[in-house]
């Protein structure tokens, strides 16, 4: 079945309590049994069911099933946030003395795990420059337990060649983890391109409405179960109400992402022609350094772009003149959001770290919503009219 069909029906085919024609929101933290025998059967995994919501919960199960299917995975597990999914995955896979390879341009919070928390645990972290594929391959070839990828990156929309890098990671026996938040499973499926695991911040496109935090991990039964066992005890579990909102968001994911893709393409072309704009970063543009790779591994180019202003134009002036954008952190919501890396994705980093990551100071990150696109280009036109 197609993705739009799957997103609607996955986890919901077997019928809901009372014949309800929507998934149930089950806030209960525990589940009762009439006999000790049936209780034991569930507790000891001899029968399906739920015991305690820090372990499993029916509403979370619907969300996990939808994401499992959308990513083409054997298993999926949810978390209280994207960072919980990422940190629980890394802390499950890595031991003191292990080595991890990644790139300099990962999400700001992930970058902090690499620069601060993993070194403190005695894990060796090698961060290659994102645009330098040779450097990434050289670091992988030295050997690593985990290869951690993210593409397209946030906020400068760099693209990594997933087929090539996943194969290199597998060749040295690494577990390859890919953050697919910016692309979404509608546009890109890292597991099909060779990644062992895929992580998401569900707070972005998956939820889509900016009203629930969450995270998801998809992959093989074995690896997902290892991380699930860590999460069960360490407790970064998703709230059922948040799971309900995210699962509801997934029902329109395909429609929304198709609109995000086409709106972003139109806005990118508009900005590319605009005299106030120095550079536009969007993998759908032929001028993007990795456009061919993006086209070979993505079905659409996503809803996020960024652009830098020419000398003399004020970032805050342009941002503050926008009427149709929340000046706020986050991305992937139905409304347009705009911001600067220093207050959004890379608020965790110093100005020097941002410069080292190649993030221009006059950069605006623009998460294109699903508004009528002519309204967005008109809004940008008036905001860019003066310096
Ligand atoms: C937002 C984001 C995260 C972190 O997710 P939270 O849900 O905010 O914890 C991780 N990776 C990427 C690419 C993101 O955009």
Image (cartoon, rainbow, N blue to C red):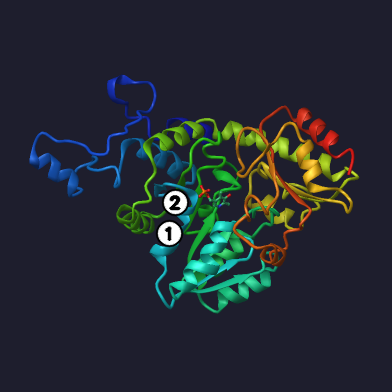
- Give the Cα distance between marks 1 and 2: 8 Å
- Which residue is more in the foreground, 314 or 267? 314
- Residue 116, percent across and down? 52, 68
Percent coordinates x, y for residue 204 in the rendering: 56, 42
* Residue 297 vs residue 217, the one in the foreground: 217
Q: Residue at x 91, y 45 (%)?
A: 275
**In the displayed structure, would residue 22 be above or below residue 257?**
above
Does residue 129 sit above or below 157 in this rendering? below
- Please tell me how crowded label 2 is: few (under 14), some (14-19), or many (20+) other residues with Cα within 10 Å: many
User: Is the CB of mark 1 within 8 Å of ligand 1?
Assistant: no
Q: Is residue 141 visible?
A: yes
Look at the numbered discs 1 and 2 and tell me whether their residues touch, using CB distance below 8 Å.
Answer: yes
Q: Secondary structure at mark 2?
A: strand
Identify the residue at image location x=68%, y=53%. Answer: 341
Q: Nearer the viewer, residue 384 or 334?
A: 384
Residue 174 visible in the snapshot: no
Which labelled disc corresponds to residue 217?
2
Q: Is residue 383 left or right of residue 300?
A: right
Q: Is residue 378 left or right of residue 50?
A: right
Residue for badge 1: 89
Compared across the picture, whether 170 is left or right of 75 comes to right
Local SS, label 1: helix
What is the x, y in percent for residue 349? 62, 61
Of the numbered discs 1 and 2, the one sitting upstream in the chain is: 1
């Amino acid at each position: 079945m197609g993705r739009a069909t799957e997103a609607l029906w996955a986890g919901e085919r077997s019928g809901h309590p009372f014949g309800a024609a929507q998934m149930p929101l089950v806030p209960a933290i525990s589940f009762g049994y009439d006999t000790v025998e049936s209780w034991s059967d569930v507790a000891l995994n001899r029968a399906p069911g739920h015991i305690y919501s820090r372990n499993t919960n029916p509403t979370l199960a619907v969300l996990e099933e939808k994401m499992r299917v959308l990513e083409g995975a054997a298993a999926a597990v949810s978390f209280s946030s994207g960072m919980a999914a990422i940190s629980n995955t890394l802390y499950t896979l890595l031991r003191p003395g292990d080595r991890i390879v990644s790139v300099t341009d990962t999400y700001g919070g992930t970058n902090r795990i690499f620069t601060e928390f993993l070194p403190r645990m005695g894990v060796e972290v090698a961060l290659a420059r994102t645009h330098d594929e040779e450097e990434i391959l050289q670091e992988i070839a030295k050997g690593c337990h985990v290869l951690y990828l993210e593409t397209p990156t946030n906020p400068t929309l760099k693209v990594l060649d997933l087929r090539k890098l996943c194969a290199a990671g597998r060749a040295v026996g690494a577990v390859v983890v890919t953050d697919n938040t910016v692309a979404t499973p509608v546009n890109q499926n890292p597991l099909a391109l060779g990644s062992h695991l895929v992580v998401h911040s569900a707070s972005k496109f998956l939820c889509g409405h900016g009203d629930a935090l969450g995270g998801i991990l998809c992959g093989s039964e074995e690896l997902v179960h290892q991380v699930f066992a860590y999460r069960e005890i360490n407790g970064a579990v998703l709230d059922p109400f948040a799971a309900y909102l995210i699962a509801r968001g997934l029902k329109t994911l395909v429609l929304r992402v198709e609109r995000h893709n086409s709106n972003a393409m139109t806005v990118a072309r508009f900005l590319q022609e605009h005299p106030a704009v120095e550079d536009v970063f969007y993998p759908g543009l032929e001028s993007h350094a990795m456009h061919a790779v993006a086209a070979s591994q993505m079905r659409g180019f996503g809803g996020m772009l960024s652009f830098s202003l020419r000398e003399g134009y004020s970032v805050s002036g342009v941002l503050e003149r926008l009427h149709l954008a929340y000046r706020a952190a986050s991305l992937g919501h139905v409304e347009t959001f705009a911001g600067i890396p220093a207050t959004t994705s890379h608020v965790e980093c110093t100005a020097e770290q941002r410069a080292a990551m190649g993030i221009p100071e006059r950069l605006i990150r623009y998460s294109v919503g699903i508004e009528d696109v002519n309204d967005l280009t008109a809004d940008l036109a008036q905001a860019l009219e003066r310096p």
